[in-house]
Amino acid sequence: MLIEILKIIGGLIALIFGGDLLLRSAVAASNKFKISKIVIGMTIVSFATSLPELIVSVRSATLGYPDLALGNIVGSNIANLGFVLAIILLFTRIKISDSFYKSDWPMMFIASVLLWTFIQDANISFYEGIIFLFILIVYTVYLVLVRGKKDFQDSNITTNLSWAFIFLYCLFGSILLSFGSDILVDGSISIAYHIGVSERVIGITVVSVGTSIPELAACLVAVLKKENAISLGNLLGSNLFNIMCVLGITALINPIVVNDYRLLDFDINFMIFISLLILLLVFIPKKMELHWRDGLILIFVYTIFIAKTLT
């Protein structure tokens, strides 16, 4: 058991450092291309911080643990809004731009509803994976071509990296993410069998929170650098990428078949609920702003979710 615990801890540490390196390389590259902050957050940063979910889910599915793969994504999306965003709001308030309700939140919500629709037969097929990826590609092209150059300002996260260092950061970040996800999945599965906990519970709790750490690190750095647009855009974009990209690619490699129906009966419904809650909090009580009180509400809701998952 000790070895499995050390694997999980080591995997999480590797994911943290790997995600940070990849994030810095992504933002530095996007600065050189002069893309606006919110688009940086919704695309490059989101993809970089979603790589742990991608690697963990693909590996879990190919090893024959589909509930861990799907539970990781659903749990990570819930953690991004109920845990990561909540922590961010305890440090700062976030002013919401019009793009939140015009395109960013609607796309994230559409992705969530589409996942709910596809998974009703307890299966995400090869062709459904193609649909996910097609929608993501179209939306990404829209972001880059239509919104990419609007209101560009250099990001303060990192701007002094040469192309050589950008490549090295990307390379070593990817290696750490791959290694970290490998031992994290192995340790999680072993502990699940030792204590009699289902793959779903491990995926929803330990693995999903672990793979959300890059999002938390990216958002905290963004807040410290006064880049709140990147922090919110990263979370919305990460949730979109988790569904469209991670599950899309995973389904292409190995179609996902659900074994634990609590993923359908509770987890995915809760993911949609917390997405709707974010929209409500944006307009109530103060329109187009999120404050520390909203953060406390989100933490309370997330605590209820974890408690319900463990019972």
Image: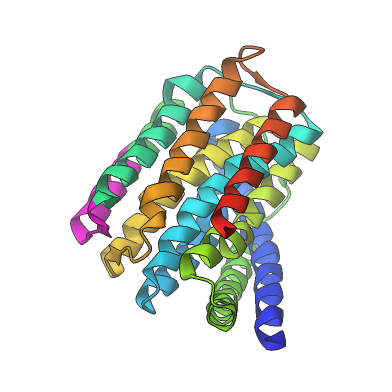
Q: Could you say which is closer to the camera, residue 25 or residue 255?
A: 255
Coordinates of residue 170 in the picture (x, y in percent): 59, 63
In front here: 238 or 63? Answer: 63
Q: Nearer the viewer, residue 113 or 155?
A: 113
Which colouring convention does the figure follow? rainbow
Closest to the observer: 176 or 76? Answer: 76
- The answer to whether 221 appears left or right of 236 in the picture is right
Exactly how many numbered labels are in the figure? 0
Outermost residue toward the front in this view: 311
| Residue 124 place in picture, x, y as percent | 27, 57
Span colored in magenta:
121-138
Q: Quadrant of the N terminus?
A: bottom right
Q: Residue at x 26, y 48 (%)?
A: 118
In the image, taking residue 67 as reference, residue 279 lies left or right, namely right
Q: Is residue 31 visible?
A: no
Residue 26 at x, y percent in the picture: 58, 51
Residue 251 in the magenta stretch? The answer is: no
Choose top left, top right, bottom left or bottom right for residue 97.
top right
* Occupied quadrant, residue 205: bottom right
- Corner quadrant of residue 252: bottom left
Q: Residue at x 71, y 51 (%)?
A: 217
250 w.r.t. 36: above or below:
below
How would you classify the magenta stretch by its main secondary structure?
Answer: helix
Q: Position of residue 92 (x, y in %)?
A: 78, 30
For image coordinates 60% across by 22% down, the residue present is 281
The quadrant of the rendering that contains the C terminus is bottom right
Side of 261 where 229 appears, left or right:
right
Q: Residue 133 colored magenta?
A: yes
- Residue 146 can be seen in this image: yes
Which residue is rendered at x = 71% and y = 73% of the image? Answer: 9
Extreme-left residue of the structure: 127
